[in-house]
Image (tube, rainbow, N blue to C red):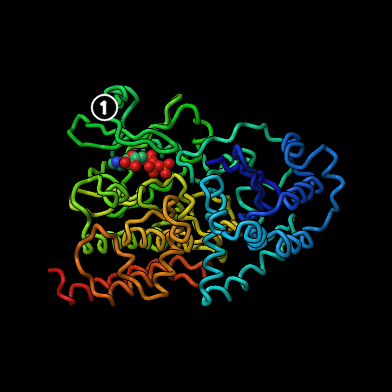
Amino acid sequence: FGVLKDLSGCGTYHIGYLENPNERLFYINGELVERYLFCKALKLYQENHCLIRENVKRKYCGLDNSLDKLPFRSGRKFLKELVKEGSMEHHFKAQKSKDNDAEYVMLTPKNFAMAAPGVFLLCCGLICPCFRARRKESTLPVLEKEPNSLDSDSSLEISSVPEKIPFSPLRVPPSPLRVLPSPLRVPPSPSRFSMSPKLDRVGSVHLNMSQIARATHNFSPSLKIGEGGFGTVYRARLRDGQVVAIKRAKQEHFETLRTEFRSEVELLAKIEHRNLVKLLGYVDSGSERLIITEYVPNGTLREHLDGLRGKILDFNQRLEISIDVAHALTYLHLYSEKQIIHRDVKSSNILLTESMRPKVADFGFAKQGEMDSDKTHVSTKVKGTVGYLDPEYMKTYQLTTKSDVFSFGILLIEILSGRRPVELKRPPDERVTIRWAFNKYSEGNVFDMIDPQMKETIEREILVKMFGLAIQCAAPTRVDRPDMKIVGEELWAIRMDYLRSGRKE
Ligand SMILES: Nc1ncnc2c1ncn2[C@@H]1O[C@H](COP(=O)(O)OP(=O)(O)OP(=O)(O)O)[C@@H](O)[C@H]1O
């Protein structure tokens, strides 16, 4: 995989490129575009006095002054041109004429990291008539935006002030598909994330560094239980016998990760739900930053789906896990002190207890919502994991709770089918799981979608309801997605049907 480089940071265009040994791909607002449109967007940046690195201009758009030769268009005109000529659809058509296999072209490992969200958008728009009309409607407001307007897209986090920001190499994503904040963006204002002193005393576990070093045997590799993009996780036994998980920030990314860690602690401190990993304590001392949470002993949901944890999950367990995750998200969206959008709902962030109950973890990307204000969304940089990322959020940078609903829809299909959101080793028409599922669902082949490792027979009606719900959650536009509370209620009703059907209990 190439690394997606995001040049955003100015105005409402979010432009980026992905460079592989054999190929360069360019995108604007999450969509693949031709190079010349990318260069025009750079030109627009330049006209708006935004920072563009000279080497990027030179490398991708020719000589320094070649940008100046491109005709300048107003933001509105440019966006119209973008839609007319350079959209993902255009790219698809261009590729198709060359190759006759557009999907294959879009989904090679080389370009997948960029293409997948767009593919979701496009494929859902193309193959699902009921979503298509809505999709067209919903793109309109975005098209009307001027690059420097101070409307909803003038992001809370992305400064439009053309400030010179020292270049730092883009950090390599922890997993190849995780979308990370761009280093070229102005960091969030310190005040938004500054920790109140009392947060250092958050939770019930208060340890100093030497106590932590003792509990982790000096961060012994034998106690390491996992590694994520932001740190290494250790299991530790405290003096009173309590077993906890300690996430230690990676030193090399210390400054970049500060925001993620603070965000995680601040939000975790406010929540209390049996299906959410509980924060126990926090250490921010010198060159160390650690988060102490409850230890969840039975691995991640993904490990269970992969059969790495012994017994394969049965249908009832999958249904109960789905319900619990839906409840956890409903709590975050509706009932926590402040509305919280998780932004990284995925199977590897769901930990299981010994009794196979899930706990949603990893609040590094979580964000406070706008529940108490008149605003319908938060405008913010895109974070999350490709494959689970809401295409509308990717396109508009407008974050709502419905982005979590989208990820949950993808997760639900994963739980039922066992398939990852993207499986590059499969034939082209099966690589994007949501698309494959939608096709199967439309053909009425729900049994084909069930995880082959699951041997029970489930009533067709129940599967139709569950897959139908998952597909609805993963609708391309947020207006078509149900609220998380409704999703939980629907799943609960499905479970009632399932129990009544006499297959279990
Ligand atoms: N509270 C916990 N209890 C038990 N295991 C945990 C806990 N927190 C994390 N882990 C383990 O550590 C691994 C890494 O967790 P972490 O949240 O740092 O990263 P991740 O979610 O896997 O990756 P990324 O943050 O890049 O998405 C998890 O996959 C899990 O196996």
Q: From where the camera sits, is residue 505 visible? A: yes
What residue occupies the far left of the structure in this picture? 505
Q: Secondary structure at mark 1?
A: helix
Q: Is residue 405 above or below residue 175?
A: below
Q: Quadrant of residue 288?
A: top left
Q: Is residue 333 above or below residue 294?
A: below
Relative depth, front residue between 190 and 153:
153
List x then y, in percent, for residue 486. 37, 71
Badge 1 density bin: few <14, some 14–19, many ≥20, Cα 10 Å: few
Q: Quadrant of residue 73?
A: bottom right
Instruction: Tell me the residue at 73%/58% (across/down).
Output: 149
List x then y, in percent, for residue 367. 48, 51
Amino acid carrying label 1: it is Ser
Q: Quadrant of ligand 1?
A: top left
Give the labeled residue for mark 1: 222
Instruction: Tell me the residue at 86%/45% (across/down).
Output: 68
259 to the left or right of 456: right
List x then y, in percent, for residue 297. 23, 43
The C terminus appears in which quarter of the rendering? bottom left
323 to the left or right of 130: left
Q: From where the camera sits, is residue 486 visible? A: no
